[in-house]
Amino acid sequence: MEEGQNKISGKYLVKIIFYISIIFSLFQLYTAGVVLLTAMIQRTVHLSFVLVLIYLCYPVKNKSWRWLDYLLVGASLTSGLYILFTFKDLVMRVGNPNTLDIILGSLLILLILEATRRTTGWALTIVALVSLAYVFWGHLIPGDFGHRAYSLVRVVNHLYLTTEGIFGVTLGVAATYLVIFILFGAFLTKSGGASVFFDLAFAVAGWARGGPAKVACVSSGLMGMINGSPVANVVTCGAFTIPLMKRLGYRPEIAGAIESVAGSGGAIMPPIMGAGAFIMSELTGIPYSQIIVAAAIPAILYYLGLFFSIDFEAVKSNIKGLPREDLPRVGPVLKRGLPLFIPLAILLYLLLVAKSSPIKAAFWGIVATVVFNLIFGGKDRMTLKSLLEALESGAKGTLMVSIACTAVGIVVGVITLTGLGLAFTNVLMELAGQWLVGALLMTMVATIIMGMALPPAAAYIVIAAMAAPALVKVGLSPLVANLFIFYYTAFAPITPPVALAAYAAAGIAESHPLKTGWAAMRFAIAGFICPFMFIYSPALNMQGTVWEILISFFSAAIGTLGFAAFAVGWLRHNLTILSRAICFVGAVLMVKQGLISSMIGLALIVAVYLVPKGFLFLKERPRETVV
């Protein structure tokens, strides 16, 4: 009897979650395209939905404690409704909160911490807890990182009643930009987007040597550009590409590495950049169009480096492509994908030509996706059920990133209240002096470490608040400084020892996680160097004449080829340690972008390519396959 009751209650709970998710998504669509709410109201309603869904979708493991989940749901609703019904009075009490404000503000902080733990694990939760410990006891720390003492009233007032903490720009980004693009991705997927992207990638690259790996490069890049989640992208695309790569001869760790690198790179690929461009624009005030133009060439270089590595590995291991007769043709795929490509074109037109807000553009992109799918969708035409499933999927897809951004709001609130960002800037300046490379290296390490614990968007927001001012002080423009930070948050998921995207790929590939992580770093080596490229060559950010941009791109492209040869150990021949080292030095000189250094670098790479086998090479050249 008790088991039957549990099944019935479980069915009801699934339905409740389903309906709440749909209402949540409809609210987001309504406020994106019909009625714009004030920032505080929008963020409060969004956070209330997120907390309620998290406590329903991520329950306690012990069923006898399930009542606690419902209690937390009630507490989440109470804290949200309190703000909604007393909003005007709360605004007047900023700086002078009453007792109920303090109680409910403290309760909301605890609710956020527990929801963060349930969805993202302990890493981000600990970061938020440490920041709270710092705000209460940091006055005991001597030196630059010490600050004045703050009372509970002052802290809760700052985090709960102002837009500098919980309800600040980080939650604002999640409640507007991120959720609407996650919904856009959900509708694209339900209308056959993943299948079309895969078929298009196979039609274009499946026949080439290492075809399945190049398919992963294309399809994962396209999907990652939209959904912005490296792990989710790897799981979605890798379930298909990784087994195929293994079947054709790629070692398991190599197959997993290629998919994780391809999936992680989508976050830096314009025009959407996993919504990262919109976050950067919101934080810095830099126009969106300027950001995606500056990010275009570095993203191309990232995937060019991966493409070279895939090709070299395929030749080295004698891995052929798939027979053309087994592959889809480009024409039929493009025709089938027309209902998808038109909404994407509308989205780009609204963003780049009409200069619409990203939120409005994504809203009309979703509308166009549904309309064109219903008219021209054919076998991919969505039913009422799939439309509702897209709404549910979009709502659930935003939970983790939204609560992460909310927890980061606590961290950012502590930074702004205590002046930690200024202290970090001063210390970074003291350690690096005026040595730009030192400041860049320290920022890179801090960003990757933070990116191991936080989702890319959240890690970027935290590090940008602390390190971007320091990079600007040593001579970088705000745009370049923020791009530098953003790129390394995108690469953290493929950086051991906590390479989440690589480990997800390893699970699918049935390979050793650390081996897969280190292989991913090798295949992404050009990407790791790329931010330093545009620091020393502004033309790679489209700053300069057409001739300067072309020369810089050519030099950097040869550099990525050299890095790929170094990483894989092949350039027309299998390379020895010495020849790999020469390729690496040549690639670094190409990246340096001076005329003399570029000529020397080019000469070194060409020499390794042309020198007779047996002089700098270890083995006979393997039999090449025809591309």
Image (cartoon, helix red, strand yellow):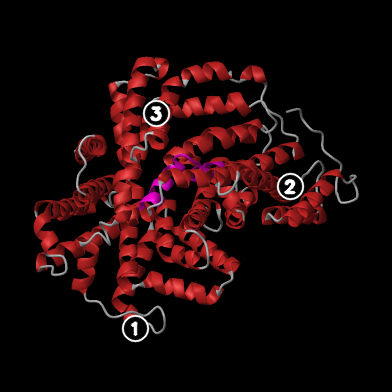
Give left or right: position of 586 versus 618: left
Viewer-closest of 341 and 194:
341
User: Furthest-front residue in view?
Assistant: 545
Q: Quadrant of the N terminus?
A: top left
Residue type at mark 2?
Answer: Ala
Query: Few, some or many C-alpha atoms within 10 Å of disc 1 (few <14, some 14-19, many ≥20)?
Result: few
Q: Is residue 267 magenta?
A: yes
User: Who's the residue at 42% across and 29% down the image?
Assistant: 344
Which element type, helix, strand or loop, lies under badge 2? helix
Q: Which residue is mark 2?
A: 565
Q: How many marks?
A: 3
Q: Decide: is 418 above or below 210.
A: below
Tag on residue 346? 3
Q: Quadrant of the C terminus?
A: top right
- The answer to whether one can see residue 393 in this image is no
The image shows residue 302 at horizontal and vertical percentages of: 59, 45
Callout in the foreground (3, 2): 3
Q: Decide: is 380 above or below 112.
A: above
Range drawn in magenta? 262-282
Q: Decide: is 387 above or below 20.
A: above
Q: CA distance from mark 1 to mark 2?
A: 52 Å
Q: Are marks 3 and 2 in contact (CB under 8 Å)?
A: no
Say whether disc 3 or disc 2 marks the residue closer to the N-terminus.
Answer: 3
Viewer-closest of 296 and 491:
296
Which element type, helix, strand or loop, lies under badge 1? helix
The image shows residue 207 at horizontal and vertical percentages of: 66, 25
Main SS category, magenta section: helix
Q: Which residue is mark 1?
A: 140
